[in-house]
Amino acid sequence: MGLRIATNTAAQTVQKNIKQTGKASTEALEKLSSGKRINKSADDAAGLAIAKNMEAQVKGLRQASRNANDGISMVQTAEGAMNETSNILVRLRELSVQAASDTIGDTERGFLDKEYQQLVEEVDRIAESTKFGSISLLNGSGSEMDIQVGTFAGESGQIQYDPSQTNATASALNISGLSVSSKDDARSSMENVDEAITSLSEQRANLGAIQSRLQSSVNNLEIQSTNLDASRSVIEDADVAYESSQLASANISKQAGVSSLVQANNLNSQALRLVG
């Protein structure tokens, strides 16, 4: 190979290679530090578009899951209150059976009736005070609402819940105005309370069906979200082992390049010594 003094092509070539390995090292560091294979459109324009679309879908699925869980919380609030109302109805029936017997007198029935009336008032209090935020759940005054669980255009993605169909007030259960102060009143009360228990059980069954459907939606949404996020990860996320090896390789090449550049720069000095 000829020796040239004016132009050191060997050094220029080495410098070019050092720049390339430096760029490779920087790219590997960027991917390792961000955890992503695609950090800008230049890395993979098509892959970036697909990954961002998947990311939007995953976030939509997660929000839909939160919506469904909020719906479950709402139904559980109503169900919990109705469970206590059910316990009260059981106690009202117990008092009615006790008051219907001639083994106690009118004085004792009067004592039983005081408890009876307090419990009926408690049924109303529970119905009027049970709310989810500002939404009344048990007094029949609510309106139908849509719980959004769908995330894709064109799909039927709402589950309806109508609090107005749930009414657990004393008047709705037909126990308002009842008494156990006499034997006849107590026997009438038994029949009304039995009907109230049946009515309340039917309403609780409806709530249970809604809750079950919402829970199924949550399960399905979580599966979709997990699978879609895994697909997005394959496209967008960095392979740490691969990028680490790329970084190590680039650093070794860079060190070798620096050493080679020193030697290449010495070629001109060697040529001058020959001339001298």
Image: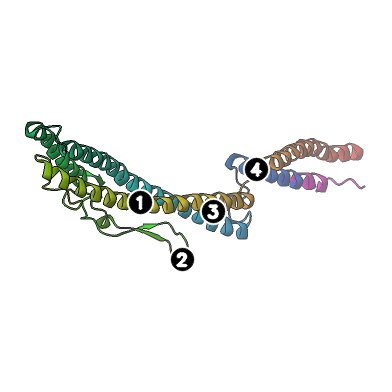
Quadrant location, the C terminus: top right
Alpha carbon separation for disc pair 2 and 1? 28 Å
As drawn, 96 above or below 200: above
Amino acid type for the residue under numbered disc 1: Ala
Label 1: how many residues lie within 10 Å, few (<14), some (14-19) or many (20+)?
A: few
Residue 197 placement (x, y as % from top left): 27, 47
2 or 1: mark nearer the eye: 1
Identify the residue at the far front of this view.
102
Circle 1 residue: 205
In-image side of 157 versus 29 (left or right): left
Residue 248 placement (x, y as % from top left): 73, 37
Q: Which residues are magenta?
A: 1-15
First-in-chain label (3 vs 2): 2
Circle 2 residue: 155
Q: Which of the two residues, 50 or 166, is positioned nearer the viewer here?
A: 166
Alpha carbon separation for disc pair 4 and 3? 36 Å
As drawn, 214 above or below 89: below
Q: Quadrant of residue 114?
A: top left
First-in-chain label (2 vs 4): 4
In the image, residue 172 lies in the stretch drawn in magenta: no
Residue 224: which numbered mark, if any?
A: 3
Amino acid type for the residue under numbered disc 2: Glu
Circle 4 residue: 26
First-in-chain label (1 vs 4): 4
Can residue 134 be spotted in the picture? no
